[in-house]
Each structure stands twice: as C-alpha cells, then as structure tokens.
Image: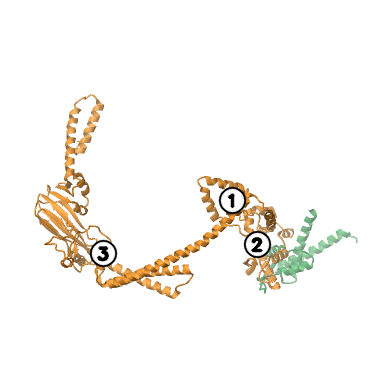
Chain colours: A orange, B green
C-alpha cells in the first residue's frame, strides 16, 4: 500500500505514488536548475513537462494502470535523459552550471527531525540547520532551563512553529542536501544504512543510554498527545452535554416565567420598577417579543450542543431558518417598543411650588421613616396610623425592584428674612404637556409642626401615572443666623455639606448635627467653634510675634524668621499682608 | 579529455544539421525526431532536443503548430521556415565541403 498524490503536469491530471512523486519532483528540480541561466528556460521546461506528462499517460494506458509508480518515472527519466547528458550536446554560451553550484543553492530549511528526536526533534532540527552535532544544542537547551525556565517556553514555541520533516524531500531540505537525483540517492542509501544499523542494534539490545531515553521520552510524548486529543474530545462532549442540560432547564424556566407574567396580568408585578415604566396596553406584546428574543438564541445553543454531543442534527435547515426569522421579528418588535418607550422620556417639564414658613430661631429637620400607605392599603394591612400610631418603617435602600424616586433637599441662604420652602417637581414625557402632567401627578408630603420640619423620603405617583423619571427637589431658604439641627436620617438627602464629618466633630454618639446659616452658606456649628478657637490662638501668637519683632533688631536671621512666621499667621487668619 | 571535447564539438554541429535535415522532410513531432536520430544511431536523450529546438525556433529557423493529441497535452509539430531552408542549403554545401576535406585528409588527394 502506498499513498498516492494527484499532480497536474502539463495540464494533465495524473495519480502518482508518493515515492514516485518525490523522484519526479527531484528530477524536475534538477532540470529547472540546469536551465535556470538559459534565456528560454520557461519554454524549455514547459516542453519537457508536457512531454513527461505525455509519456506518463502513454505508460498508464499501455499497462492499463491507474497510478504512476517509481518504475515508470525512472523509465521516463531514462528517455528524457539525465541533466549531465544534456550538457555534452547543447551549446553553452555561459559558464556551465556545475553540480557543486546547486549544493550552495540548495536552501536549508528548519524542520523538526523526527528520526533523531528526543522530545519533538527541535534540537536535532536546529543542529542540522546550524551544522553542528545535536548534542551541543541539547546541552545548551538544558542550560536554558536553569535560566528561569525560559528555555521551556522557547522549546514549546519552536515545537509549534517548526514543521515536522515528513517527506524525504523535506528531510533533505533539513539537512541541506540538494533536492536532485544524486542527493536523493544519497539520502536513500543513508536511510537504508540507518535501518540496517537499527536492526542490528535492536538485535543486540544495546544502544546509547541517550538514545534509549530519547525513544522512551518520544513514545511518552506520543502517548500524551494521543491521550490529550482523545480526552479533549470527551471533555468537549461533556461540556456540550452540560450546555444542553442547563439550556433546557433555562428554556423551561423561561416558558414558566412567561406564563407567570401573562397569568398575573393585572397583578402587582407591574408595580415594581422595570415593569412599571411600560404602558398597560403594550405589556402583552413587549412581554412576548422579549420572550422570543431570549428564547430563540438559547434554543439554538441547545440544538448546536446536541449536535456536538451526540453527532446528531436535531433540526433541519428550513426549521432553523424559520427560527431565525422568528427571532429577527422578535428583535424588531422589541426594538420598536424600546424606541417608543424611550421617546416617552424625550421632553422635560418642571413645576415649582413655594410656601413661606413660620420663622423660628432653630429648625429641626428630620425624615419620616414610616411607610406610606394609601387608605385602601391601610385597611387591608389593618394599620391605624392616626389613632393607634402604628407605623411601618421603610428602608431607604434602592433595591433592584424599587422605582428610583429619591428626593433631594438643598438648604440655602434666604435673600429676605423669611423662611421659604420651594418644591420643584420634575418629569419626562413624550411631549411637554404630558411631561408637565406627569410632574403634576407627583404627590409629595412634608409636615411642619412647630419648628420640626419632617420630610417624606419618597414621593407617590397618583393612580394611573407611570414612571417617567419623576424627581422632587426641595429648596429650603433660611435667613442668616438661623440654627438648623439635622437628624442623621436626613444626611443622605443633603449632599455636599460634609454632614457626616460635622456629626463626628460634635459627638460620635449624637444622631444629629447642629448647623448655622452664615453669609457664606450653611456651616457646621462645631466646626465654626473650632475655627474660632484656632483664630483666637493665632491672633494671640501674632501679638506676641509683633512684640518680639522689636527685640534684637540687629540679628537679621532672627528678624527673618519672625517676619516669616508673622506672614504665615496672617495668611491663615485671612489678613491681607499689604 | 581532449578527445571528449573534440567529440562534443563535432557532435554539436552535426546534431543541429541532422535535426534541420529531418525537419526539412516535413512537419514532425519532437519525439519522432528522437526516434529518427536513434535509427540514425546518433544517440541523444530527449532532454537535449528541447533546448536545441527552442533555440532554432527563436533564431527564426523553425516554426511550429499546436496539434491536439489523443494522449496527453497538445503537441508541437515543427516545420522549417524559409530562413531555415536557406540555412539548411548552406549547411548542405558546408557538409559536402567538410566530407570532401575529411576524405582527402584521410586518404590523400591522389587516391
């Protein structure tokens, strides 16, 4: 048995045995080399190739064979003549191309030598390339292992990029032997010799330890490679099997989820955040298209995994095409509705409402943590907030299903002497009118009882209003000199004041902090006190320094250091130096 | 070595003359030329003939036609051009002179 190759020579397709092919290739290389300096080399070589094709075809027909063997190629070569025979007859204007010249032209190539390998033949291949004994390269390679193991990586890389010398021609290129007939013959002879020697060695059970180890390691790596490729396939299939299993579970849960959403049509699901932005009339369509968008790709993944795991095509082409169409329709529908919903956030409207509050020297600001219940809910949950003072406290965290509807409080200096609270309602909408309407549908409550100002942490939306990014901003304007006590709960609604720091300066255990409205805005009272004490100290130091300056007027070093310190103190006090 | 060299020189010239003579008898295919040369005991390999034919063609002595073949690729059938014919007649004359010269040289003018 021998491998055959299909070649195209002189526009003729010919089946040829591998060994015969190598012989023919070597001969043609030789011919090409011979005519390379000739003016009409291409035409001559083409003529010769055509003739070879003709001769081979004739031989196949005569012998009623399918495949060209080495014998046939040898017959053709005999008829066409060896290159040496060409020389004697044809006139040469140029210097004849001698055989020694080819040897220099025969380019050496880097291959892995599988015959002399220890692991993968990398070292032996390099040794051929640089024309040394393989053992020196191996010693060098071993040495690199001690240099941080870089050699290991380099070896692996070379293993990957250097091709194996598989055919005889490749082996000859590796050794730098000319790929012509003499080289061919030489190589063949060497190979036969090696086989004979190998047989002799096998018979005597001897051979260098190095060779024995090499054979062992080589076999071990062969085995390892087979093991990896074998188990690799199994792992692949196992992974595919898991994907099928989890995919099916996921698909089932999608179906159940879809049914559940459809079933609780008017129920509380839509009161929770991501669903609450959807208009009631479109819910069915959006739900269905979302279902398709998720369901189809997972189904496709499962079907593909089935194919990998069980080598079975679970679905035919028409059906998969139909699935693709269904998915595209689903994507289009989902996209359309997403665009439609986002268009409802296009316009912005604000609505402000101002109230003057009764003036007090001190305000206490707090947050009402009790959860808001509508009248119906109060009845259902049996909560009587008014008479029995039952409250349900609310946590402030914005969970995944909580509509973002925080309020914000700003405390500013009042231009007049009056205290004033401005509530600003903001909302988005498709048109300005609808945005304004959405803003008007915000229901926000705060309570002013004596000097206690209690804000609700959330606003409510009146029935029938859907979430369109409504916001409530509260602006409290108080006159200069008014004290404000901020309860700890308010801190998260009052940014940019350093509220937590102030609380700590005052007292760690307090659940409030005291503030004062100044000309420069709201200031922490504890901080103001600290600053006052510091200023007092600095002023005292300044007086001392100015007194000391009059001393020792002759000592310039002393004078310099005093005046430097004076400048520093003045700067800290905010006194202009000039 | 000297003998070889002289032989080569002689064969070179004669081969060219013989090839032209064979072609002058009519349109002919390269391998048939080889066959004719074999019959004439002027042993050459086919590889020698192709460069020679190509050179003669490029020098304008020969022209060729493509002819479809039942086995393998189309064949080149060579014929002499007018130039080729003229040169061949010159060569014929040269050959007569050379043959005479060789005859005289070998046997003497008087025999």
Front residue of this view, candidates A15 and A221? A221
Front residue of this view, candidates A458 and A232? A232
Q: Is residue B5 left or right of residue A524?
A: right
How far across and down, in percent of the image, does residue A578 sit? 19, 36
Q: Which residue is mark 3?
A: A273
Front residue of this view, candidates A298 and A434? A298
How far across and down, in percent of the image, does residue A163 sit? 57, 57
**Do badges 1 and 2 share one subunit?**
yes
Which is closer to the viewer, label 3 or label 2?
A: 3
Q: Which residue is mark 2?
A: A22
Q: CA distance from mark 3 to mark 1?
A: 67 Å
Q: Which residue is mark 1?
A: A123
Against A567, residue A444 (above or below) is below
Chain for disc number 3? A
Q: Secondary structure at mark 1?
A: helix
Q: Residue at x 48, y 69 (%)?
A: A310
Chain for disc number 2? A
Point out which mark residue A84 bears.
none
Q: Earlier in the sequence, mark 3 or mark 1?
A: 1
Mark 3 vs 1: CB contact within 8 A: no
Q: Is residue A289 left or right of residue A133?
A: left
Q: Secondary structure at mark 2?
A: helix
Q: Is residue A117 left or right of residue A525?
A: right
Q: CA distance from mark 3 to mark 2?
A: 75 Å
Q: Quadrant of residue A555?
A: top left
Q: Residue at x 49, y 63 (%)?
A: A234
Q: Earlier in the sequence, mark 1 or mark 2?
A: 2
């Amino acid at each position: 048995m021998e491998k055959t190759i299909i070649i195209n020579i002189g526009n003729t397709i010919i089946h040829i045995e591998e060994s015969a092919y190598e012989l023919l290739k070597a001969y043609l290389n030789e011919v090409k080399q011979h005519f390379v300096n000739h003016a009409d080399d291409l035409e001559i070589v083409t003529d010769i190739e055509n003739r070879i094709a003709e001769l081979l075809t004739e031989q196949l027909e005569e012998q009623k064979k399918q495949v060209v063997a080495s014998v046939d190629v040898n017959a053709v070569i005999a008829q066409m003549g060896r290159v040496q025979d060409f020389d004697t007859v044809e006139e040469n204007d140029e210097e004849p191309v001698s055989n020694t010249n080819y040897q220099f032209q025969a380019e050496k190539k880097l291959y892995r030598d599988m015959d002399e390998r220890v692991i993968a033949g990398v070292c032996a291949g390099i040794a051929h390339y640089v024309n040394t004994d393989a053992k020196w390269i191996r010693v060098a390679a071993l040495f690199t292992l001690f240099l941080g193991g870089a050699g290991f990586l380099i070896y692996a890389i070379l293993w990957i990029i250097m091709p194996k010398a598989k055919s005889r021609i490749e082996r000859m290129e590796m050794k730098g032997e000319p790929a012509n007939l003499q080289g061919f013959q030489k190589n063949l002879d060497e190979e036969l010799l090696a086989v004979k020697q190998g047989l002799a060695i096998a018979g005597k059970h001897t051979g260098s330890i190095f060779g024995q180890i090499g054979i062992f390691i080589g076999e071990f790596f062969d085995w390892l490679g087979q093991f990896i490729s074998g188990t690799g396939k199994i792992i692949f299939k196992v992974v595919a099997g898991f994907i099928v299993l989890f995919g099916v579970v996921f698909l089932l849960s999608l179906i159940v989820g879809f049914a559940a959403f459809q079933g609780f049509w008017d129920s509380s699901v839509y009161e929770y955040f991501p669903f609450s932005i959807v208009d009631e009339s479109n819910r069915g369509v959006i739900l269905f298209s979302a279902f398709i968008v998720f369901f189809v790709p997972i189904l496709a993944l499962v079907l593909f995994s089935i194919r990998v795991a069980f080598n079975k095509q679970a679905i035919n082409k028409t059906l998969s095409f139909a699935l693709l169409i269904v998915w595209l329709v689903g994507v289009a529908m989902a996209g359309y509705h997403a665009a439609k919903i986002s268009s409802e956030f296009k316009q912005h409207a604000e609505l402000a409402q101002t109230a003057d509050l009764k003036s007090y020297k001190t305000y206490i600001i707090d947050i009402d943590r009790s959860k808001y219940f509508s009248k119906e809910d109060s009845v259902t949950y049996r909560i009587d907030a008014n008479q029995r003072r039952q409250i349900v406290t609310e946590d402030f965290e914005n969970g995944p299903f909580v509509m973002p509807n925080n309020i914000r409080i700003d405390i500013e200096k009042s231009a007049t002497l009056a205290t004033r609270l401005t509530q600003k309602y903001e909302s988005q909408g498709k048109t300005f009118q609808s945005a304004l309407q959405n803003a008007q549908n915000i229901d926000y409550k705060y309570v002013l009882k004596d000097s206690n100002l209690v804000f609700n942490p959330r606003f409510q939306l009146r029935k029938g209003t859907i979430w369109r990014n409504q916001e409530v901003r509260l602006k409290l304007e108080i006159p200069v000199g008014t004290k404000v006590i901020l309860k700890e709960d308010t801190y998260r609604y009052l940014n940019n004041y350093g509220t937590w720091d102030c609380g700590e300066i005052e007292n760690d255990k307090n659940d409030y902090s005291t503030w004062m409205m100044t000309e420069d805005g709201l200031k922490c009272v504890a901080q103001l006190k600290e600053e006052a004490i510091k200023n007092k100290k600095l002023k005292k130091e300044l007086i001392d320094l100015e007194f000391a300056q009059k001393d020792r007027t002759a000592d310039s070093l002393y004078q310099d250091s005093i005046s430097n310190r004076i400048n520093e103190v003045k700067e800290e006090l905010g006194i202009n130096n000039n | 070595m000297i003998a070889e060299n002289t032989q080569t020189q002689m064969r070179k010239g004669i081969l060219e003359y013989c090839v032209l003579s064979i072609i002058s008898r009519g349109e002919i295919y390269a391998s048939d030329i080889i066959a004719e040369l074999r019959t004439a005991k002027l042993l050459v390999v086919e590889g020698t003939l192709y460069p020679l034919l190509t050179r003669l063609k490029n020098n304008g002595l020969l022209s060729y036609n493509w002819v479809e073949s039942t086995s393998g690729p189309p064949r080149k059938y060579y014929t002499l051009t007018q130039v080729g014919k003229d040169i061949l007649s010159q060569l014929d004359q040269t050959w007569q002179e050379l043959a005479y010269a060789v005859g005289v040289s070998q046997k003497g003018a008087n025999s």
